[in-house]
Image (cartoon, rainbow, N blue to C red):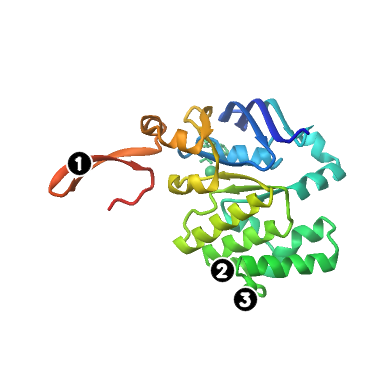
Amino acid sequence: MNDIVFELQDVKYSYQKKYPALCGIDMTIRQGEKIAIIGANGTGKSTLLHMLDGLVFPDQGRITAFGQELSEAALADEAAAWKFRSRVGFVFQSADIQLFCPSVREDIVFGPLQLGVAANEVARRLAEVARVLDVGHLLDRVPQQLSIGEKRRVAIASVLAIDPEVYIFDEPTAGLDPLTVRHIIDLVVQANRRGKTIITAIHDLHIVGELADTVYVFGKDKKLARSGPVEQVLSDRAFLEAQNLVHIHGHIHEGREHVHPHLAFERHA
Ligand SMILES: Nc1ncnc2c1ncn2[C@@H]1O[C@H](COP(=O)(O)OP(=O)(O)O)[C@@H](O)[C@H]1O
Ligand SMILES: [Mg+2]
């Protein structure tokens, strides 16, 4: 059985043909994998995720999704686009882009209704995702008026309601409180246990090990700097330092000055 979900071969992409964002990326993502994309700011993580979601297309090289070329022309076919949209769900970095309906309820049912899911099944999914993401009390609220954590939960609920095979998350935990972060991690892990493929761009190296088995590190040159099992890649401090993902930081500890590597974005004690 061919279980390849996405395959990228020497993919290049530049914005407006002049600002490079992806420079010769090769990747194979298989069904049921849980992978993380890490890299400093501006290394192309979001661009890659947008490409996996059929929002931008390679200038050079090739990407396939479920064995078929993922191109603008392929998605111009309504049936093919419909099929692709029902299989791949994207949680954007900014929930404000994702939520556009007058109420939370309408945002959550929008995807499945668009995809032609029967009304009773849509109602069942709404009730379920509202419970799982604890947004039942927000259903009649205006999404734009919610807190960032509430918006993020609604955005995730709206993608869960589609019940896609592949979940793509762009920095799903950024700016959230620890309890909400924990909740999102649990959800991701559970979805993966149900066989879903999970692709997450993430800044917080502390939780990469929970969100992924395999990690892809994007470098400043917009190339893939390394990929491999999470423990293996994250244990190479010198490499992470070179990628701007950790920094050396001196501080006083038990009366003596120590120098410790810190993960990027780690709060200093
Ligand atoms: N809309 C855009 N127009 C021009 N350049 C862009 C645009 N979006 C991103 N870029 C550039 O593409 C590169 C990769 O950006 P991005 O994929 O957002 O990185 P990351 O998500 O890793 O922070 C950066 O150099 C960025 O400046
Ligand atoms: Mg980004």
Q: Quadrant of residue 157?
A: bottom right
Q: Which residue bears the numbered disc 3? A: 137
Q: Which of marks 1 and 3 is nearer the N terminus?
A: 3
Q: What element carries label 1?
A: strand
**Depth check, front residue: 130 or 43:** 130
Q: Is residue 127 above or below residue 214?
A: below
Q: How far apart are marks 2 and 1 (CA)?
A: 43 Å
Q: Is residue 230 left or right of residue 158?
A: left
**Crowd tier of the residue under label 1, counting other residues whose Cα lies within 10 Å: few below 14, some 14–19, many 20 or above:** few
Q: Residue at x 53, y 49 (%)?
A: 171
Q: Distance between the residues labelled 2 and 3?
A: 12 Å
Q: In which quarter of the image is residue 158?
A: bottom right
Q: Earlier in the sequence, mark 2 or mark 1?
A: 2
In front: mark 2 or mark 1? 1
**Depth check, front residue: 92 or 161:** 161
**Crowd tier of the residue under label 2, counting other residues whose Cα lies within 10 Å: few below 14, some 14–19, many 20 or above:** some
In front: mark 2 or mark 3? 3
Some atom of ligand 2 lies within 8 Å of the CB belonging to the residue at label 3: no
Q: What residue type is labelled 3?
A: His
Which image quadrant: the N terminus? top right
Residue 172: % across, % down: 55, 52
Q: Which amino acid does label 1 sit on?
A: His
Q: Which residue bears the numbered disc 2? A: 146
How many numbered markers are drawn? Answer: 3
Q: Quadrant of residue 59?
A: top right
Q: Earlier in the sequence, mark 2 or mark 3?
A: 3
Residue 105: % across, % down: 70, 69
In front: mark 1 or mark 3? 1
Label placed on residue 258: 1
Q: What residue type is labelled 2?
A: Leu
Q: Is mark 2 on a helix, strand or loop?
A: loop
Farthest residue to the left: give it: 255
